[in-house]
Image (cartoon, rainbow, N blue to C red):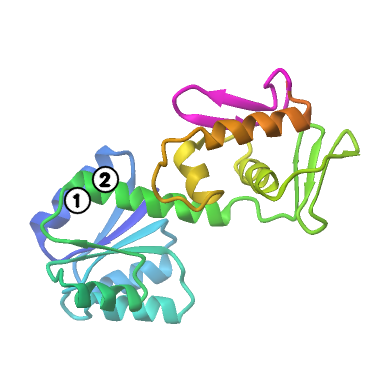
């Protein structure tokens, strides 16, 4: 991911930048709100990390300006102000997440990557017609066909297949499915995903699991059949 970090404390800025680069992310930095706002509006980023207390232009003003211009990039707010009212104010200003200083870098990384996944999910394949091999899904007509034959799916099965198709050729983790299909933001430790995947494969005639492939210990990939 490409990330913009707006942080005036040089030690914290260097610490976060180093950690994010070690995690294979590209990072641009700004030392004040005005410079950060300029970068955020002239470059394209997957996630913005914005300190609340910044010189020249405070972090909440930066966020309000960006939201006012229509920019919807995910924003993680960093702040030493951790009261409930402070967090609520930050989120209402347009922040997507709020992390209080001091923080553990592993938590910051997890929050940043979660925001990045959310952006990916909203930007992948926006077409109303999704296809893989001889399988076709028409989102407007709410129809699924394989080899021209209509396949009747229940609402949850349709949503599951749609989610997989939007990430065609990419790994879809169990966590992504729980959040994207079931709206769970925790793992209920049930076999709900496995049961629905099995039913979906059966209805699609995917007896050899060649269309929906299992990546053991990780998730699933739907891709063209060789």
x%, y% of residue 60?
Answer: 27, 78
Residue 55: numbered disc? none
| Residue at 56 percent of width and 31 percent of height | 194
- Residue 82, placed above or below residue 144: below
x%, y% of residue 25?
Answer: 33, 44
- Residue 52, placed above or below residue 225: below
| Residue at 52 percent of width and 43 percent of height | 177
The quadrant where residue 67 appears: bottom left
The quadrant where residue 9 appears: bottom left
> Residue at label 1?
16
Between the residue at mark 1 and the residue at mark 2, the CA separation in whole angstroms equals 6 Å
The quadrant where residue 221 appears: top right
| Residue at 43 percent of width and 82 percent of height | 68
Please tell me whether residue 213 belongs to the stretch shown in magenta: yes
> Residue at label 2?
20
Is residue 110 found left or right of 124 in the rendered image?
left
51 and 203: which is toward the camera: 203
Magenta residues? Answer: 207-225
| Residue at 46 percent of width and 68 percent of height | 72
Mark 2 surroundings: few (<14), some (14-19) or many (≥20) residues within 10 A: many
Kindly check if marks 1 and 2 are in contact, taking CB atoms under 8 A apart as contact: yes
Mark 1 surroundings: few (<14), some (14-19) or many (≥20) residues within 10 A: many
Is residue 68 found left or right of 194 in the rendered image?
left
């Amino acid at each position: 991911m490409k990330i913009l970090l707006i942080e005036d404390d040089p030690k914290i800025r260097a610490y976060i930048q180093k950690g994010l680069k070690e995690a294979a992310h590209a990072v641009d930095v700004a030392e004040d709100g005005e410079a950060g706002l300029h970068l955020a509006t002239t470059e394209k980023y997957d996630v913005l990390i914005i300190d609340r207390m910044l010189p020249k232009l405070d972090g909440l003003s930066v966020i309000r300006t960006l939201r006012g211009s229509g920019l919807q990039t995910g924003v993680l707010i960093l702040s030493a102000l951790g009261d409930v009212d402070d967090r609520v104010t930050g989120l209402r200003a347009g922040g997507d997440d709020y992390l209080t200083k001091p923080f553990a870098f592993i938590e910051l990384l997890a929050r940043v990557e979660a925001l990045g996944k959310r952006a990916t999910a909203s930007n992948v394949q926006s077409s109303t017609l999704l296809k893989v091999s001889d399988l076709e899904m028409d989102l407007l007509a709410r129809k699924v066909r394989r080899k021209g034959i209509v396949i009747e799916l229940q609402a949850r099965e349709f949503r599951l297949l749609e989610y997989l198709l939007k990430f065609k050729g990419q790994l879809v983790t169990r966590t992504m499915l729980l959040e994207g299909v079931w709206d769970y933001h925790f793992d209920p430790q049930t076999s709900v995903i496995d049961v629905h995947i099995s039913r979906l494969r059966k209805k699609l005639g995917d007896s050899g699991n060649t269309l929906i492939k299992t990546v053991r210990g990780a998730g699933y990939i739907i891709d063209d059949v060789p």
